[in-house]
Image: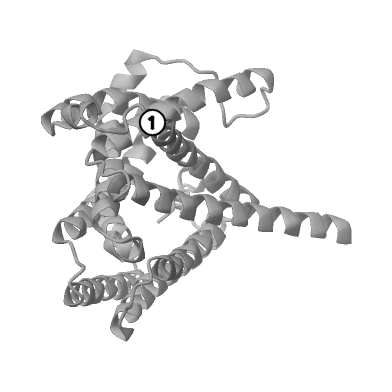
Amino acid sequence: MTESLFRRTVKIASVVTAYWIISISMVFLNKYLLSSPDLKLDAPLFVTWYQCVVTVVCIYFLSFIGDKYPQIEKFPAFSIDFKVSRQILSLSVVFVGMITFNNLCLKYLGVSFYNVGRSLTTVFNVMFTFVVLGVRTSFKAIACCAVIICGFLLGVNQEGSSGELSYSGVMFGILASLCVSLNAIYTKRNLEVVDNNIWRLQMYNNFNAIFLFLPLMAIMGEFKVMYNFPMINSAYFWGVMTLSGLFGIAIGYVTGLQIKVTSPLTHNISGTAKACAQTILAVSVYQEIKTPLWWLSNVFVIGGSGMYSKVRHDEMRQNMTTLPVADSKDSDPATESPNGSKH
């Protein structure tokens, strides 16, 4: 039993560490690609498009693992059904908006402020849960959202006072948060189309995104930008681009793995702690000087997000506890399930 507990502890620690390393590395790598003075590449849509291409190619090769080892359900056989592709097109449009605005937010905001810049996802989750699904939120959860909003506004104020704030970046962060929330709702509605397999959904989303990005890149003139890009034939540039795509699919896998070996609540706590570490690391790496109120805004955002996860977890446990003793005439336990989505 001691050895089994030790192995489980090592496994959990390894997965959490991998999640932190991959997630933080991906943010810094994307920041380098999107706004590095070394590259001077002004084509954020192309960077995002290429990452989608890498994801689809990776899922194609990973599908062979699913064929060889049928017990591994994460990597199904690679097959594109255009009927299914059309069915989830609305989700793919939201998905494209999510990853585009996310990268644009990172392009115009510093890594240290990135977490605050796109911190309103939880607030939009609560709003859309009520507006779209008609589900009311508890006072405790709303109070946590109020803390997050206060942290966001305080952070914008302090970043603006330092003269480093990009209002375009803030707007892209708000739009990214909005799309992340919508993506969660549309994902729930479309999972049945792909047999509740999140990897098939990722495959179709990225496949659709490859084509959805093309007219956007044409409108923004990014084909011309790439044609004139001095490093277009650089192996180093394409190596970094490909690595960013690999990190993109790796974070999807390790996120699911972290939830599997721990719990959704532990995953949210890990993500909150990771955001804190990422902010401190970014301030250190870029040698930034921040005011006490700036740090307080991060405390509000990270603390409010962590408290919200805890409140929702407690509410779900309470609902699950009360379901078995509920009157069968009033509710059907089989049709009710807790919301385990990541916020």
Q: Position of residue 113 (x, y in %)?
A: 31, 65
- With respect to residue 127, does 253 lie above or below? above
- With respect to residue 215, does 47 lie above or below? below
Q: Position of residue 197 (x, y in %)?
A: 50, 31
Please state which of residues 231 and 319 is positioned toward the viewer in this rendering.
231
76 lies left or right of 145? right
The image quadrant where one finds the N terminus is bottom right
Count of marks, rendered view: 1
- With respect to residue 113, does 172 lie above or below? above
Q: How is the image coloured?
A: one colour
The image quadrant where one finds the C terminus is bottom left
Q: Is residue 179 visible?
A: no
Q: Residue at left 45%, top 69%? A: 276
Q: Residue at left 35%, top 60%? A: 111
Please state which of residues 133 and 197 is positioned toward the viewer in this rendering.
197
**Quadrant in the picture for residue 16:** bottom right
Q: Residue at left 16%, top 28%? A: 224
234 lies left or right of 322? left
Q: Which residue is mark 1?
A: 234
Q: Does dot 1 land on a helix, a strand or a loop?
A: loop
Q: Position of residue 20 (x, y in %)?
A: 54, 56
The 10 Å Cα crowd at callout 1, few under 14, some 14 to 19, many 20 or more, is few
Q: Residue at left 46%, top 15%? A: 79
- With respect to residue 104, does 211 lie above or below? above
Q: Is residue 23 visible?
A: yes
**Callout 1, which amino acid?**
Ser
Q: Position of residue 36 (x, y in %)?
A: 31, 50
Please state which of residues 301 and 127 is positioned toward the viewer in this rendering.
301
